[in-house]
Image (cartoon, coloured by chain):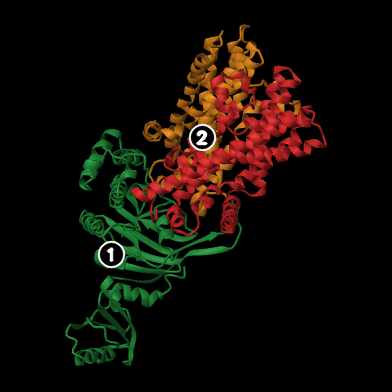
Amino acid sequence: MRDQLRVLKHGLIASWTMYSAFQTWKTWTFTWLSRLLIQACFYALIGRMLGSQQQVDYLLIGNVVAIMAIDATVVILLTVGERQSGTLALMVAAPSTHLTAYLGRGLVNLGSGVAASTTAFLVLPPLFGVRLPWPSAAVVPLMIFVVGLSCYCYGTCVASFVLGFPSARWLALNLSYLVLMTFCGVNVPTSFWPDWLRAVTSVLPMTHGLAAIRAFIAEGQASTVLVQLGLEVCVGVAWFAVAAVSFDRMVRRGRRDGTIEFGG
Amino acid sequence: MGLFLSGVRTQFWLLRRQPDELLTLCTIPFTVVMMLSIVMHAARPDLVANAFLAPTLIGLWGFATGLATTVLVGERWTSTLELGMAAPRSLHSVYLGRISAVMVLGVVPLGETWLLGELLFGVTPAVHHPWVFWAAMAASVFAMIGTSLVLAAAMLLSKNSNNYLNFLSFPIYLLSGVMVPVQYLPEPLQPLSHVIFLSWSADLMRDAMAAPPVAGVGWRLLAIVGLGAAALVGGRVLLAATLRRARELGAVTYA
Amino acid sequence: MSVRVQNLTRTFRKGKGWRPKGDEVTALDGLTLDVPTNEVHGLLGPNGAGKTTLCKILSTILLPTSGSAEVLGHDVVADAAQVRQHVGIVFGGERGLYGKLTARQTLRYWASLHKIPDARAKVRAGELLARLGLTDKADDLVETFSRGMKQRVHLARGLIGDPKLILFDEPTTGMDPVAARDFRKLIGELRDEGRTILITTHDMDEAEEVCDRVTLIDKGRVLATESPRGLAAMSGLHRWVEAETSLDVTAIPGVVDTETRNGVLRVKTTDDQAARAVLDFLLDHGVRSVHAVPPRLEDVYLDLIGRRGMEV
């Protein structure tokens, strides 16, 4: 375990170095964060066009949380990039497990996403007249973090499959987060969808976590909030387990059929 | 003209081999479902036209920022920009041709949106003034070509062009009123919308779909074409300046 | 004279902005060079010596800071359009190719940029593909090609405008020996057609084999321009001895350096006398295959530029 944590630590440092090569705090704030905030505003404004504060509330809160999904699933691109830079062979040959390094590759981006959602949660509601139950609303960023982790796990699972089809990585990334943003109760309640689709959304991240956040903000029952949050965690763990197994299988298959590239 | 067409042809050759570049087409269905689900769930059939227009124009813009704009950045990556600069003929026409080829595909999201609306939700909005609608669409494609050239030349200067291209999505969608008309924006922001051709396109196309007669069609079309032409000229000047600077400094990027 | 470069200087400024104002770095420092028509000329030098900067200036994609450069009598600044008509560029490696175009499409695209009408471009592309042995693969994507084949696409691309001067930038990078041999043959053919060829390379054997003359460049200046053999003779008084042995000769006075390659010992000595001493020593110890050899270009390169290939 300690070995794994050390791998994780150095993996994080490496990810951070690479991330900050492309983003400074200025570019992050003015290009990325601002874009995500405006994205949430775009949807909240639809609520205003629909003419009811209830719609504004629903769309704003949904999208404040949903904007984190892009960052949380960027791990799909990063793992493929990691493989393309030829490190897979080196990591498989190293004594420690490659799983930590690979599946921890996108944690910096997850941080960016959670930070963006949290900022949106603090800044946007007053602009759109959305009331929050302060001071208890201060817990919401923690819940956003839980949703983020769960989305991240889902991302690693997609990543473990896409590793075999690197040219599909952009498509996979876009589809992954768009599915969450479209169907998981962000813009309309999941009850809007046909039953089969609703069943699918119940095993996707975001659905339960977002429901928990909505219930909490509406000052619903604590049990509802906790159950939904618990379900969100379970969904995340399940996706991560599948990711680990799938990644391990890919490496084992690679050792058998020689598809682990050596030296790129 | 020959050079322009050679650019168009080459871009089609490239696109045929890189279907993954047509990513925008795969994201349109989600936008369609999001927009239509919102208006259907709110029981507002009167806003179906907005919900159809948004994916159409977002798709057009998506083609521009996702594909057309990266034509020049891609040239820099592959070092073909240097080879092009050493060729006897000027690069502007060939690059404009390549960008135009991409933007002609920008019409596809229109068909895709209508098809998906019908298939998934069983609705299609009426277009009461089809000629105005199509004229606005054609003018928008032209304006998008010009805008793409400016953006492409600007991105050529940047090392991290993806950061800027990511930014140029929702802020533009919001300001140009592709879904929610500009009147809903805070008043100080509204003048900004007027310099984005897409806001004129969205307005005119929405009016073309509605039943009442459309006022000032000529002027409004002219605004779209005019903004597009200005961008085209600006793009050409910026590209020329960028290439001249690259010859002087030995570096294309700004930083 | 195909290329006439006089007192050419090029400096770069570090820093950011539209006009960077940082420290000045000199890439070319008063370089003078003449390359007669129909010569195969090699540019040798360590990384950062200024070889590529010179090629960029000759191909008009970079302006000189001062001095002048002419290609076939046309100034690269004032008559850039004329220069571009006559210069072909060939990169080594993967740069400069569209992986998603076929070899034929690549040529037709570049033909349009070289003012060749479509009908003629079609014929010319066919001819070039045939000449470079790519006819069978003409309609395959370039990204599926081996290194050697990509290099041939590069060559065909560089030849599309029928250039009188061809600039090769590290052409044999990553080529296997067979491909490299074919490449050298082709250089000979291009010269026979009356073209002038300028090659930048790190490969001494290649330079020795294909170049009529070579120029050694370091720190933006010309160290020497000579035929490979003439340059080798400049290597001071050093003499080399080769022998198939594993004996240690380093103790003999006048031995500067030794190296063993494929079981052959190469001994660098200060002068004739020292070389003779080594020969005698080896013969005395019963070594049969011993001979004094002329210096190779590589030896001269190392002598003049020093062993600092790894420092850059």
Chain B color in figure: orange
Q: Any mark on residue C275, and which? A: none
**Which part of the image, by quadrant, shows the N terminus of chain B?**
top left
Is residue B243 rendered to the left or right of residue C284? right
Is residue B136 rendered to the left or right of residue C105? right
In the rendered image of this protein, does residue A184 appear above or below residue C79?
A: above
Res. B171 visible in picture: no
Name the residue type under label 1.
Glu
Position of residue B4 measured from the top left corner of the image (x, y, whole percent): 41, 32
Residue at the image point whose x is 26% and y is 58% from the top: C180
Q: Nearer the viewer, mark 1 or mark 2?
A: 2
Res. C179 visible in picture: yes
Of the pair B40 and B13, the residue shown nearer to us: B40
Residue at the image point whose x is 78% and y is 39% from the top: A138
Give the green chain's letter.
C
Residue at the image point whose x is 61% and y is 17% from the top: B50
Is residue B69 rendered to the left or right of residue C52? right
Name the residue type under label 2.
Gly
In the rendered image of this protein, does residue C33 appear above or below residue A97?
A: below
Position of residue A212 measured from the top left corner of the image (x, y, whole percent): 70, 31
Of the pair C144 and C65, the residue shown nearer to us: C144
From the image, tell me which residue sits under label 2: B66
Give the red chain's letter.
A
From the image, tell me which residue sits under label 1: C206
Position of residue C101 measured from the top left corner of the image (x, y, whole percent): 34, 39
